[in-house]
Image (cartoon, rainbow, N blue to C red):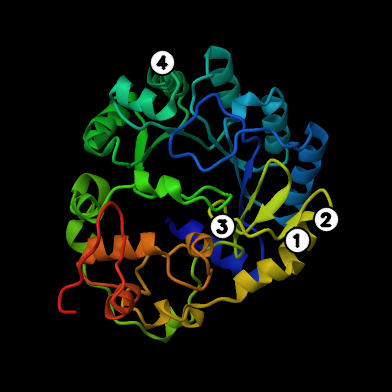
Amino acid sequence: MTTLMQEMNERALQVGVPLSVQFDLTYRCNERCVHCYLDHDDHGELTTAEIRCLFDQLAEAGVFFLCLSGGEVFMRRDFFPLLEYARSLMFCVKVKTNAFLIREQEADRLHDLSVESVQVSIYSYLPEVHDGITKLPGSLERSCAGIRLLRERGIKVIVANVLMRKNLVDYPGVVALARELGAEYTVDPTVTPMMDGDRSILGLGIGTDDLRQIFRTPELVGNVDEACAPPPAVDSDTLDGLPCSASHTFCYISPYGDVFPCVQFPLPTGNIRRQRFMEIWKHSPQMNEVRAIRGRDLPTCSSCSHLGTCTRCPGLAYMQGNMRGPSTQDCEKSYARTGIATANMLAEAAAGQEIPFGSRLVQISGL
């Protein structure tokens, strides 16, 4: 993070401003990715007028970064009028799309409207693997064609790769493909439960041994020694620290106007059809409950040596049953990264419980 971004985040935190918001325009999508956590039926999306009103409220609230996502944003016929309105309000707009529907005209409009970046999910450099995950024949070819059109116009493109069992061995090829396309590359080994709480798709995720290999790959993590270093001692600053930016400088809004602390944190806090955004942001009991949690308030994690370096997601913990509890997916990452068991893993091992991380049971030595 740049110094300017750090200063913006710190200032937003001090004055209680939602610096960044992700708004999903729709859950409808032309792809049916095997790991997707969304219900793709339309249950009453916000209208064009309602979205324009929402954008006005976000601007009044001080939002600077606005991420427009889905579903697939181009499934909305009013996408470009809404994007144009968002830019007129001076939002720094990021777009997430599969790029399948991007042609010359769409690429030109995205360039003319000066979007900050476009993120496109690519799961493999092999059509049979990528298309097998999206369940849309020809999707890799069309997505790559869309990326090329964007890059020809100088638009920043980020290739996002969710690692699963189905595509794990393909990431070097995706890195090479992103480089060939002139795009940046980001990798995520997290499969998110369905927003309705269904955790069955977690079986698509990779196991501990594979995670360990990921953390020891310089192309993905940079300096391996730093990435895999043992966690530093937990001090008072760590215990008083914030778990993440959810409800502090960031929140998520669904296509139906529901406001959540984060896209991975489906705790309902209000709906903009019934309340103004700032009323929800400032006064929602649920939002303020999340906002009040510090590291020392986490019954298990506060005693964990990984507290200061763990990627613990309170939303994943919430979907596991307790927003103040551990997220076993993040425990697995910390263990795979350092080889040091987390407090949660040690407690479960001491209780004689099996620890079903990833695709295999983790064995804790010495217990």
Position above or below: 32 against 317: above
Q: Secondary structure at mark 1?
A: helix
Which residue occupies the foreground of this view, 57 or 62? 57
- Asked whether the beta carbons under mark 2 and mark 3 sit within 8 Å of each other, the answer is no
Q: Position of residue 148 (x, y in %)?
A: 41, 20
Determine crowd level at label 1: few under 14, some 14-19, many 20+ residues with C-alpha closer than 10 A.
many
Q: Amino acid at mark 2?
A: Gln
Say which mark, if any, is on residue 188.
none
Q: Position of residue 106 (x, y in %)?
A: 58, 19
Q: Please give left or right for residue 169 compared with residue 321 in the image.
A: left
Q: Tell me which label, 4 or 1, sits earlier in the chain.
A: 4
Position above or below: 13 against 205: below
Q: Amino acid at mark 3?
A: Phe
Q: CA distance from mark 3 to mark 1?
A: 16 Å
Determine crowd level at label 2: few under 14, some 14-19, many 20+ residues with C-alpha closer than 10 A.
few
Which residue occupies the foreground of this view, 65 or 352? 352
Say which mark, if any, is on residue 280.
1
Q: Amino acid at mark 1?
A: Ile
Residue placed under numbered mark 3 in the picture: 265
Say which mark, if any, is on residue 275.
2
Residue at 51 percent of width and 73 percent of height: 324
Q: Secondary structure at mark 2?
A: loop
Q: Amino acid at mark 4?
A: Gly
Q: Position of residue 333 (x, y in %)?
A: 31, 60
Residue at 62 percent of width and 30 percent of height: 28
